[in-house]
Amino acid sequence: MAKKNESRPITLDPAVAELLAGMEKRQAEAQLPRPERERLLKERIKIQARREQRATYDLPPQLRKAIQELAEELRLPQSQLVTLALIRFLQAYKNEEVDLAQFKEPSRSPRYDWNLVLAKELRSLEKKKKSGD
C-alpha cells in the first residue's frame, strides 16, 4: 500500500477561494458591533450609488498631470474639470468643429477600425506649459 504524500500543498480553484474569502469576511463583519456594521452598510450603499457615475480611461501621464495641476490651481475636483472638457468636446464634435480624420490611423485590433495618433497634441500641451512657467 502506497503512503499518501501529506506535504503536498492544497490548491483551491480561484472561484472557491473567492467564495471562502467572502464568507470569512461576512462572518467577521457579523461579529462587529451594530454601529460599525451599519457604517459599513452605508459605505457599501454609497459606493454602489457612485458606480454608475464612474468610468476608467487610459490617459497619457502628461495629460493626467496637466489636468491635476489645473484642478489644483483652480481648486476644484479633477472629475468636474474633465466632465466639462468632455461636454465641450462632444458639443464641438457634434457641431463639426473638430475633425478627427486628421488623427486617425488604421488599427490592428480586431475590435477597433481606427486609433487616434495624438503625439503632436501632447507635445504642444507640454510646450504651452513650459512657455507659461
Image: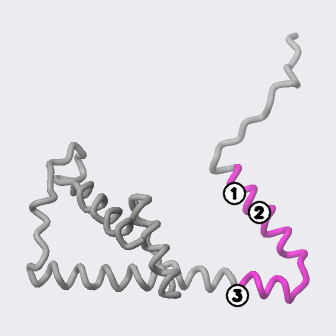
Residue type (three-letter) at the residue carrying disc 2: Met
Q: Which residues are magenta?
A: 17-42
Which residue in the protein does label 3 denote? 42
Label 2's element? helix
The answer to whether marks 1 and 2 mark residues whose Cβ atoms lie closer than 8 Å is: yes
Q: Main secondary structure of the magenta part?
A: helix
Whether 114 is drawn above or below 128: the answer is: above
Residue at image x 43%, y 73%?
67
Which residue in the protein does label 1 denote? 19
Residue type (three-letter) at the residue carrying disc 1: Leu
For marks 3 and 1 on the same chain, the one whose residue lies earlier in the sequence: 1
Left or right of residue 46, residue 85 in this image? left
Label 1: how many Cα within 10 Å (few below 14, some 14–19, many 20+) = few
Q: Position of residue 122 (x, y in %)?
A: 30, 60
Whether 40 is drawn above or below 23: the answer is: below
Which residue in the protein does label 2 denote? 23
Residue type (three-letter) at the residue carrying disc 3: Lys
* Rendered image quadrant of residue 31: bottom right
